[in-house]
Image (cartoon, rainbow, N blue to C red):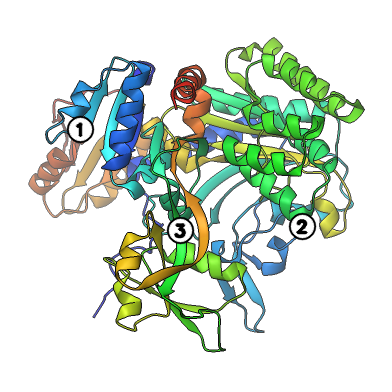
């Protein structure tokens, strides 16, 4: 099959993770001009042996899971929310932040017997967090600024990504509890790792040396 | 109002001509291989009691099964797996049969998957089970059959992977940690999450066992894996796991499969009932294993019949999908269409039967005129039309060439 000749295909999460990954690839010595000057193109060559695909975070997982991309760079937040079947080989260390439970400053979240309402963009992460605590909560999925929900009294708290905490502070909110640390991960399709072991292992070695 | 009368449920699809032909030809190929080795087909019901799939050695998450209840209110599931029902049959109706049992199956399994992920809920599987032998010969038989199956797909870039769950089990049993921590270790090895695995094992301790477990997800590749594994940790049990696997590996090389076989000692799937050698088969062009199996020596005991067993299953749909990329398969077109004019219908039927007797595929025209018959044949690509009246007229259309 012509796949022998196909370059190793890496899906990158558009935006900050993309920039950090390109920086990393350049540090290793790959020519990323095509990615830097991409225009509207979505599949871009990096040297002769790699091809970069730009996608939304959740799609990176989908492409890697189906094996149409061999590897992907995606945040741990998306991995936790989506789950899926792939190898999670390297913690790239950039894109660091955390999942946290937050709400109005000074409120005792765990007080009382009423069922709490949680607003979040990450319903699966929220559900499994409260399942582990044996707590029954109502989850409301919000698409935009989740911080609004407790301010408008839609929810008792939010589960969201917290980077610096500035947005929380400016809106009179605070972190009640950390849920999990987040950073960018290098994921690999389970079949690609076996069929293209040498290429992938060599690349990972270079990446780890340059982190 | 939503209407669902024109579509199939999420995760299912209709299989039309080419797809059916592809599936059937794969089925024939595989059942040919299985039968030639003395395996007998069995069919288990599509509905089973929930309890069959809720065992200690393998459990299916509730949400992954399609459930319904029978007229007594008992919980049923639509079969999510074939090995467990076959174990049930072996432990009951086949209990007095001479061992080993060689069984094969071709049937669908149903798994409720997350929607919109592009994977089917209905999976056509074929596989074999060799029940009642714990010998290396049985392992070799099943494993070499699995490779033979993979090779029969004529996809040059196939890969067969061998592992042994015993390596992980022996190591983790030596570890001073609670069940939850052990399960965490297993899940991190499964996804080859090196960094998190290192952190977790560092917190448990720094000894030979944690050092070996840290390396476990990296223990995949060619023959060199055996030496690496032996260097990492060696005692009697682990030594025998490795030497057993190496032995199998060498025999497969002898059979001429060098370059197609890899080793991965980090195959430690949670949901599996496997107790020893495990195997997976990959084809270039499909992002998941198309074949998987292994030894399961504890499963039948849960049905009250304590005998060892081994086997594998092939995802026929996945293989068909890969093969469709390189093979063009077209729906069969009849060779001839026969039209009998008014008063000659019986003659036409007889004529058609004569042609069929010569091995041709012959359609009987149900149109009211020969012109309509010809127009239809032209559209459908049928090469030859026959008009039966006082005289018999044959015409070749569509530039077709005949073999009859």
Q: Position of residue B120 (x, y in %)?
A: 43, 52
Label 1 or label 2, whichever lies nearer to me, is 2
Identity of the residue drawn at 71% across and 63% down = B54
Q: Is residue B97 above or below residue B231?
A: below
Element type at mark 1: strand
**Residues at marks 2 and 3, common chain?**
no
Identity of the residue drawn at 85% across and 54% down = B301
Q: Is residue B251 visible?
A: no
Circles 1 and 2, Cβ within 8 Å, touching? The answer is no
Q: Is residue B88 left or right of residue B315?
A: right
Q: Is residue B305 left or right of residue A167?
A: right
Element type at mark 2: helix
Please identify the quadrant where the C terminus of chain B is shown.
Answer: top left
Q: What distance separates the C-alpha of mark 1 from that of mark 2? A: 54 Å
Identity of the residue drawn at 85% across and 24% down = B234
What chain does mark 2 sit on? B
Label 2 or label 3, whichever lies nearer to me, is 3
Q: Residues within 10 Å of mark 3 (few under 14, many from 20)?
A: many
**Residues at marks 3 and 1, common chain?**
no
Element type at mark 3: strand
- Examine the image and state in which quarter residue B361 appears: top left
Q: Is residue B139 above or below residue A176?
A: above
Q: Residues within 10 Å of mark 1 (few under 14, many from 20)?
A: many
Residue B384, numbered label: 1
Residue A129, numbered label: none
B176 or B351, nearer to the observer = B176
B307 or B269, nearer to the observer = B269
Q: Which residue is mark 2?
A: B88
What chain does mark 1 sit on? B
Q: What distance separates the C-alpha of mark 2 from that of mark 3? A: 45 Å
Q: Position of residue B393 (x, y in %)?
A: 15, 34
Q: Which residue is mark 3?
A: A99
């Amino acid at each position: 099959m012509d796949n022998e000749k196909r370059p190793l295909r890496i899906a990158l999460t558009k935006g900050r993770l993309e920039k950090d990954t390109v920086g990393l690839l350049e540090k290793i010595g790959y020519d990323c001009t095509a990615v830097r000057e991409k225009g509207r193109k979505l599949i871009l060559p990096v040297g002769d042996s790699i091809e970069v695909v730009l996608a939304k975070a959740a799609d990176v997982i989908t492409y890697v899971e189906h094996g149409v991309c061999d590897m992907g760079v995606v945040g741990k937040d998306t991995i936790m929310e989506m789950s899926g079947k792939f190898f999670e080989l390297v913690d790239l260390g950039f894109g660091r932040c955390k999942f946290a439970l937050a709400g109005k400053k000074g409120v005792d979240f765990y007080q009382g017997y009423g069922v709490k309402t949680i607003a979040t963009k990450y319903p699966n992460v929220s559900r499994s967090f409260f399942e582990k605590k044996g707590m029954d909560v109502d989850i409301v999925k919000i698409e935009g600024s989740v911080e609004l929900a407790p301010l408008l009294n839609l929810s008792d708290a939010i589960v969201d990504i917290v980077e610096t905490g500035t947005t929380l502070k400016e809106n009179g909110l605070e972190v009640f509890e950390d849920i999990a640390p987040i950073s960018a991960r290098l994921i690999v399709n389970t079949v690609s790792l076996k069929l293209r072991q040498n290429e992938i292992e060599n690349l990972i070695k270079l990446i780890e040396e340059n982190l | 109002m939503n209407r669902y009368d024109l579509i199939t449920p999420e995760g299912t699809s209709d299989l039309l001509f080419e797809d059916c032909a592809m599936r059937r030809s794969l089925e024939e190929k595989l059942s040919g291989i299985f039968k030639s080795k003395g395996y007998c087909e069995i069919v288990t019901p599509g509905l089973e009691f929930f309890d069959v799939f809720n065992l200690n050695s393998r459990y299916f998450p509730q949400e992954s099964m399609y459930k319904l209840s029978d007229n007594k209110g008992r919980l049923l599931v639509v079969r999510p797996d074939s090995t467990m029902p076959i174990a049930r049959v072996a432990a009951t109706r086949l209990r007095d049969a001479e061992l080993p049992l060689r069984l094969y199956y071709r049937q669908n399994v149903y798994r409720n998957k997350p929607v919109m992920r592009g994977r089917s809920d209905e999976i056509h599987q074929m596989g074999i089970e060799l029940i009642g032998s714990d010998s290396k010969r049985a392992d070799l038989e099943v494993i070499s059959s699995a490779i033979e199956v993979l090779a029969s797909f004529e996809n040059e870039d196939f890969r067969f992977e061998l592992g042994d769950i015993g390596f992980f089990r022996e190591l983790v049993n030596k570890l001073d940690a609670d069940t939850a921590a052990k399960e965490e270790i297993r899940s991190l090895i499964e996804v080859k999450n090196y960094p998190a695995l290192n952190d977790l094992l560092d917190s448990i301790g720094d000894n030979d066992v944690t050092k070996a477990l840290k390396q476990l997800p990296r223990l995949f590749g060619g023959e060199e894996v055996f030496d690496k594994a032996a260097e990492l940790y060696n005692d009697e049990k682990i030594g025998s796991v490795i030497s057993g696997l190496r032995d199998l590996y060498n025999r497969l090389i002898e059979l001429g499969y060098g370059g197609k076989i890899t080793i991965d000692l980090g195959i430690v799937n949670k949901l599996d009932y496997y107790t020893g050698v495990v195997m997976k088969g990959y084809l270039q062009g499909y992002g998941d294993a198309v074949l998987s199996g292994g030894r399961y020596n504890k499963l039948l005991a849960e049905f009250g019949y304590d005998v060892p067993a081994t086997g594998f299953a092939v995802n026929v749909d996945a293989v068909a999908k890969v093969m469709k990329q390189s093979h063009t398969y077209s729906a069969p077109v009849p060779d001839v269409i026969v039209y009998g004019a008014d008063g000659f219908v019986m003659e036409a039927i007889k004529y058609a039967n004569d042609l069929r007797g010569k091995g041709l595929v012959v359609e009987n025209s149900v149109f009211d005129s020969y012109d309509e018959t010809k127009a239809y044949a032209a559209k459908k690509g049928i090469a030859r039309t026959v008009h039966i009246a006082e005289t018999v007229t044959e015409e070749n259309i569509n530039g077709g060439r005949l073999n009859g």
